Amino acid sequence: MTADLAAYRRIGTAGGSLAVSVMGEGPPLLLLHGFPQSRMMWGAVAPMLAARHTLVIPDLPGYGDSDPPADTAAASKRAMAERMVEAMAALGHETFDVAGHDRGGRVAYRMALDHPARVRRLAVLDILPTSDYWAKMDRAFGLKIYHWAFLAQPAPLPETLIGGAADFWLDWTLRSWTASGTLDAFDAAAMDHYRGNFHDPARLKAMCDDYRAGAGIDVEHDLADRATGRRIEAPTLVLWGAGGIAQSAETPLDAWRGWASDVAGGPVAAGHFLPEENPADTGAALARFFA
């Protein structure tokens, strides 16, 4: 069963409005998507969580149907996390659990660091902390995630080049990060939503600004936390694809134990896109952790 996440409401924040799908009943759980996707990526996992949780599933700023950030600084994970906290408060949720995949995972762990009184439990899917990725950018890993440096180039270089063959670049990227090397895992409606990002110049720029922030201000925020010894205190679940991106750099549990005080987790039989390639195991792991 797949949840219909096409319907959404708009939640106003200081940085612009967010498109948010809400479903389920119970304690609030915020689900954050990654690149190059939208809230639609949670469609197969949401029904497994909605029976016990009120799910809040937004598009990140500049993705899907949410307003783009004003500039690169507004695309920082700190700024995005603040917008998510503001939106959750507007919905009546002062404290909540959060799970994030890919870029959404970076917003989620930044939220846990910056707003520890808000985040009860944290799950991160197929990522390592941003500064760790850059520090480990050797030849093999640089080839694996070349897009980090490409998308972070000054405007309008990457958005112009991608815009010239948007569907090709998106499809190639999605396929290359799956375990099967195909698009079979992706729902047709979700794919239409993802392609919408890549045919809108404002959203294409916003996605590049996300990565520009990831190459600059986000690293600065991470390094400042390491320098002061600030850690994630919320219990943290780390999931990664057995054939995904995070495991190719370092054992993810070892990396996250350097950042968080209470860490558990393990691999899922998938590539990078755990919630779509293996929703059954991903949903079950999240359901156990957030129960």
Image (cartoon, rainbow, N blue to C red):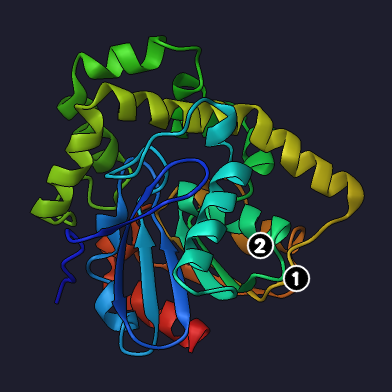
**Residue 251 visible, this angle:** no
Give the structural element (helix, strand or loop) at label 1.
loop
Circle 2 residue: 112
Circle 1 residue: 233
Query: Do callouts 2 and 1 mark residues in contact (Cβ within 8 Å)?
Result: yes
Name the kind of residue labelled 2 in the image: Ala
Of 242 and 95, the residue lying toward us: 95
Name the kind of residue labelled 1 in the image: Glu
Q: Residue furthest left?
A: 188
Give the structural element (helix, strand or loop) at label 2.
helix
Residue at image location 40% in from the left, 9% down from the top: 157
67 horizontally vs 254: left or right: left
Q: Is residue 129 above or below residue 117?
A: above
Residue 91 place in picture, x, y as percent: 44, 70
252 horizontally vs 271: left or right: right
Residue 287 place in picture, x, y as percent: 42, 83
- Residue density around tag 1, few if under 14, some if 14–19, many if 20 or more, within 10 Å: some
Disc on the earlier residue, 2 or 1: 2
